[in-house]
Amino acid sequence: MSRKSWTVFWLAALLLLFVFNGSLLITDSVESNYALTAKEMMVSGDWLSPQIYGQYWFDKPVFFYWLTALGFKIFGFTEFAARFFPSCFGLAGLGLLIWGAKKLFDDKTAFYSGLVLLTSVEFFLISKSVITDAILFFFFSAVLLSFIWATVRRRKSIIT
């Protein structure tokens, strides 16, 4: 694929994943629980024991709350701040897929794989939602890609 195609692709990815994140109100109960927990973590200064409504809340790994609180620290208590890191991890997951497809196949396969993922509704939603799924997607994909890459390299070393 040409350099221009990749430039357009990455600009489209940035636009799709980040634009209007500040306009999407946090109304879902799950999103509001995560955002409020991160806000209370930041306000209280207790970064080890997440709380919501004064009660300890160990519903999800603390890493997600830390990221959301960091978004609040950088951008203030806004919807954009709450959605910033899920979008970053969505973009990183997209980059990981493209990198893996280039390593295992070729540039054209990587481009079309990235295009399919970027235009998938589920990927779009998890990358814009204040939920742990985009981060889980990234790390799970990294582990899976590492396993596949190690398996392919091992097979090549056995054959030669």
Image: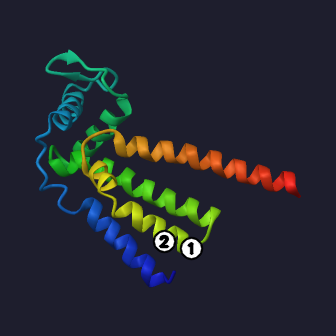
Residue drawn at the location 39% of the way across and 73% of the way down: 9
Image height of 69 relative to 134, above or below? above
Identity, as a three-letter code, of the amino acid under mark 2: Phe
Left/right placement of residue 150 relative to residue 120 reads right
Q: Position of residue 105 (x, y in %)?
A: 62, 66
Observer-nearest residue: 77 or 98? Answer: 98
Q: Is disc 1 placed on a helix, strand or loop?
A: helix
Q: Position of residue 87 (x, y in %)?
A: 31, 53
Q: Give the structural element (helix, strand or loop) at label 2.
A: helix
At which x and y percent is residue 133?
35, 41
Q: Which mark is residue 107?
A: 1
Q: Residue at x 20, y 38 (%)?
A: 31
Tell me the quadrant of the picture where the C terminus can be found: bottom right
The CA span between labels 1 and 2 is 6 Å
The coloring applied to the image is rainbow
Within 10 Å of disc 2 (Cα), the crowding (few <14, some 14-19, many 20+) is: some
Q: Quadrant of residue 121?
A: bottom left
Q: Amino acid at mark 1?
A: Asp
Vertical comparison of 23 with 68: above or below: below
Q: Is residue 96 above or below residue 7?
A: above
Residue topped by disc 2: 111
Q: Are marks 1 and 2 in contact (CB under 8 Å)?
A: yes
Q: Is residue 105 above or below residue 63?
A: below
Identify the residue at image location x=37%, y=78%: 8
The residue closer to the viewer here, 90 or 157, is 157
**Any mark on residue 47, and which?**
none
